[in-house]
Image (cartoon, coloured by chain):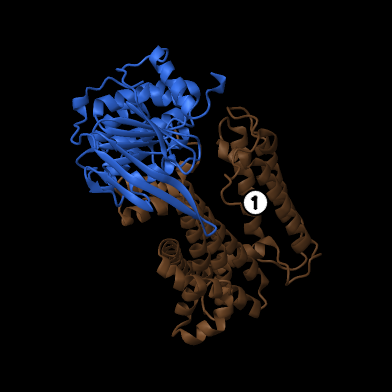
Amino acid sequence: MFSAEPQRAWPAEITGARNPRGGIWWDGVAAGCAWLGATLLTVGLTNVDEWDRTGEFAAIEGVLGALVFALALIPRGAGPRLQRLGPWLTVLAIVLAAWEVVTAKLAWLPPPFFAPPQALLDVYLSDWPRLGESALRSLLLLAGGYSVGAALGFLTGIALGWSRIFGYWAHPLLRFIGPLPATAWLPLAFFIFPTSGSASTFLVALATGFPVAVLTWSGVASVNSAYYDIARTLGATERFLVLRVAIPAALPHVFVGLFMGLGASFSVLVVAEMLGVKAGLGWYLQWAQGWASYPNMYAALLIMALLFSGLITLLFRARDRFLAWQKGLVRW
Amino acid sequence: MVAATPLDAVPIVARGTTLEVCGVSHHYTLRGEPLPVLDGIDFRAEPGEFVALLGPSGCGKSTLLRLVAGLDHPTQGRILANSAMIERPDPSRIVVFQAPTLYPWRNVWSNVAVGLEARGLLKSHRRRVDDALKLVGLENFAKALPHQLSGGMAQRAALARALVNEPSLLILDEPLGQLDSLTRLQMQGELVTLWQRAGFTALLVTHDVEEALFIATRVLVLSERAARIKADIRVELSYPRHRGDGRLTALRHRVLELLGLDATW
């Protein structure tokens, strides 16, 4: 899952990037047509209920369609990255148009539980200060908890792998307490910690720390013992063995732990925000549900997805950088 | 492939070690039972000697090397380097293992530099790393990562990693065992050249009779486990040696006889 190199080079039969140099980008033409078609649908059919921002939504679709269309016709208008997105752009327009039709135009999906795209647009345009602040609060809480948890987990894992005395005392504790889901600590944490912020930082750190500690430990434990023998005969001190041999050798495992910890921290973050913290995207979801404003929920979910997937991308980038020696790609 | 770097480019401080192995016996514990590996090994290597330990596989040769390196302690007997007990690993005694075991996260240059870095000497001795790489003919591969090297190149890098520390005792645990036979022949010659230039004492474990006789000044033939020294053969031939030399062939016959393998001669 984690060690495999993500497949980036999609073959041309899938992406349709058949025409890399010059000429007309036919997938772009299709995408442009799809977006312009969606625009016509949005403007042409009347809404069953009254929805704000239908005009703005149509305008965005139209501008996007025109832009893609223009890029498709200009030679070398679209770079290879954009060209690879061609089929996705088309499908996105079709899905958006279908969504628009079954909600706003035909009301097959009952409001208020299902909102048309322009309702989300309305939320972003009118409620962006609150949404932005929620996203920022979530991010800050996550950053604090995750970095504390990752650092402590990493140090614990190294110590477990290296020191027998530490292992004797810490290993049973880790085995006993580690498997408890961090969310199970929630009521206790909000009771013990002075503020809900510190309580949820603790919970996020806990959720992150356990997988990082276990995987760092297993990484250190599985280091080829010849690496140590060689370093020792070359005059390495204990410190050198830990910092320059054990840690770099364990790094691939550590990154698996960091990845698992990140996933666990997302889930505990959202639950903590829903139940105790009075800020953040989890809180926003809960708050929107309280007011039965479903478009706000969809809007917040979308932001959450972008945010979390961005963080995972960031982690993968860091891994690629730190573990560049693992891949067969580096040239000198 | 060994570049013609004058020896003066790599200042040799240490001369060869005098190695004394006195009545060394060793056993491992296997499921509670002692498993004897070495049985009263006794020999003395003079400074600059090249001693080959030859014996059937699994006879305890590598164990003896680990003891000499200070990685393990003998159950019985003493091992002295220049009259001092060997108690722990020391950078004056460097081991080259059968597998090159380069650190995969370091490029060739920093793999070779590991010993100097570990002892805090790297800043003042960076040139020694370059020189060692030149000595083994890898100066153009300094930035390569280990997984990009062939088996022979990786073993050369491991050799450079040892030589950069200017060991006075070089311990070689079947260093050519995993190479293809052509690379192997070539590197046997290179090993002799390096040893002649640097003047260290060398201890080579091998199960290749021809290799031992071609390289070493002295061949200790070991018995099966628990290993005893069966014969101490001096190879009094000057270098460069020639593989077709009749005297080498005669010695080879004798060693095979000692190992009980002369039936097909």
Name the residue tied to disc 1. Answer: A61
Q: Residue A132, percent across and down?
A: 50, 67
Judge by depth and name the residue closer to the eye, A173 or A11: A173
Could you tell me if residue B98 is visible in this image?
yes
Image quadrant holding the N terminus of chain B, namely: top left
Q: Position of residue B156 (x, y in %)?
A: 38, 30
Q: Residue at 48%, 61% (x, y): give it.
A: A217
- Residue at horizontal 38 percent and vertical 53 percent from the top: B75
Chain label for disc 1: A
Q: Is residue A94 left or right of residue A203?
A: right
- Asked if A220 appears above or below A182 in the picture, the reply is above
Colour that chain B carries in the picture: blue
Q: Is residue B117 left or right of residue B1?
A: left
From this view, report whether residue B61 is shown above or below residue A123: above
Residue type marked 1: Glu
Q: Nearer the viewer, residue A122 or B207?
A: B207
- Location of residue B6 by image quarter: top left
Task: Depth check: give the residue in front, A88 or B98.
Answer: B98
Q: Which chain is painted in brown?
A: A
